[in-house]
Image (cartoon, rainbow, N blue to C red):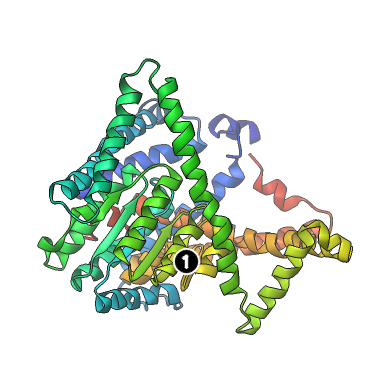
Amino acid sequence: MSAMLSGWLKTDSASRLGLATIIFFISYAVVVSIQYYRATATTLPMPKLRRVAGLDAIDEAIGRATEMGRPVTFNTGASAISAATLAAIAVMGYVAHQTAKFDTRLIVPMRFHEVVPIALSTIQMAHIEVGKPETFRPDDVRYLSSDQFGFTSGCIGIIQRERVAAQMLFGNFVSEALILAEEGSIAGAMQIAGQVNVAQTPFLIAACDYTLLQEELYVASAYLSKNRIRIGMIAAQDAFKLILVGIIMVGIIASAFGSSIVSDLLTLY
Amino acid sequence: MKRTLPLVLGFGAGLVMLLDSFFNIPFVNNLAQRYFMRSITVSVAWAVGIGSLNLLRIHFRNISQRRTNWMFSAWLVFVFGFMAFSGFFLVGHNQNPFYTFFYSSLQQNLSSTVYALNAYYMVSACYRSFRVRSMEAGALLVVAIIVMIGSVPLGAYIWGGFPLLQDWISKMVNDAAVRAMSIGVTLGSLSQSMRNLVGVERSYLGGEE
């Protein structure tokens, strides 16, 4: 069995059947959930998502900026195209929609060239969807620098010069997170952050008004759009997490009794 | 068609890369490594052009319309042109001493200066978060004091148990929480990737429908 599988599977790194099985199981669960919720859209109640205060506060932050007549800034993080960046762009689409509706300026500083066209088209489409294509300002999507602290100092300048009323930090941030958050705090901006870097989370919790905890970023687009299929996928993700917790518990109990059966199974190839 | 074609291309390319990560299928491995990985390099090169044009367009507009602080835009355009010229046309390109002088003596030092702001901001953020306004904030303050004292030689001098306590908090309590978060992030990341792959999440194409 092992010899047969090793011909097909890559065994040169951590990509062993244990890991592959997990990933394909998730894929399977996700695809099944899509089909399930598509098929039963009208007959079954939608899974309930618990309230996420940070996401509820987005409208409040935009409302505050509108009342003050000052702009909102949105950062998509310090990684190029990644799952975290795509999740941030989904939130940015919602923010762009709301700011376009209320004629509030949205400034998007960019660190990576490849995200610029995506941000431009997302914000332009939001303006078209609310029926105000003429209010779209391409100059507000600003590529600053690919250098980490060149980008950071550019952001500091924007926050101070434009006196932003709301600052949103979504995506994957590294050591610039605290500088950006504290500069926003000094400018008196309402701050909402959602990022996936565990090391930076304490800084953002300390500095921002609202912080999404890790995976809550990936729930944001389903939460904001109320899209039935996306919510179904979140439910599938939670169900799989329960299975993983079960595997971990069994592994803990087994290893307490001196057995390595679970770890052996997970690394089998 | 404007939406369907990118979705189909995205699904196909994502599937090939996924299969390449786990399986030894010569056709798929060849396609992923020889063509798709190279196409990433090419598309990123195009994106550099788009980013540079975006930067220059904004600042040329600032200069031509004499917007507030337009002179900073003029300085940026000058430095951009200067460094680009040095990198492209001087002998040795980005290894030329003239170019490396400006890179190592100016750019790197300025980066380090901005990075150093973290030291100041850590103190100001700590000050705000350590104000005891609730039970949770009080617990945070106590744990933070133990960890801080346990991390410096003074802590061991005061009481030998501080470093042990700090080590226990870091390894047992903190690591357990970090690992739980990491599992959640990994699953969330997979779910997000899958939503993008199958086209359920298409906001990156501009708008939802």
Which residue is at 34% across, 18% downward? B90
Answer with left or right where residue A184 lies relative to residue B55. right
Position of A42 with respect to B191 (left or right) is left
Considering the numbered disc 1 on the image, is that residue within a helix, a strand or a loop? helix
Outermost residue, bottom side: B134
- Residue B35: x and y in percent read 35, 27
For the C terminus of chain A, the image quarter is top right
B193 w.r.t. B89: above or below: below
The spot of residue B131 in percent (x, y) is: 61, 78
Residue occupying the point 19% across, 50% down: B62
Residue A198 visible in the snapshot: no
Whether residue A82 is visible, yes or no, is yes
Which quadrant is home to the N terminus of chain A?
top right
Q: In the depicted view, which residue is nearer to us: B122 or A192?
A: B122
Callout 1 crowding tier (Cα within 10 Å): few <14, some 14–19, many ≥20: many
Q: In which quadrant of the rendered view does residue A156 lie?
A: bottom left
Residue lying at 51% horizontally and 62% vertically, measured from the top left: A214
Which residue type carries mark 1? Glu
Foreground residue, B104 or A165? Answer: B104
Q: How many marks?
A: 1
**At which x and y percent is residue A80?**
39, 45
Q: Nearer the viewer, residue A251 or B118?
A: B118
Q: Chain of mark 1?
A: A
Residue in the image at 63% along x and 78% along y: B137
| Image height of B50 relative to A211, above or below | above
**Residue that label 1 marks:** A216
Seen in the picture, residue B39 relative to A175 is either above or below; the reply is above
In the picture, measured across the screen, residue A249 lies left or right of residue B199, that is right
The front one of B81 and A261 is: B81
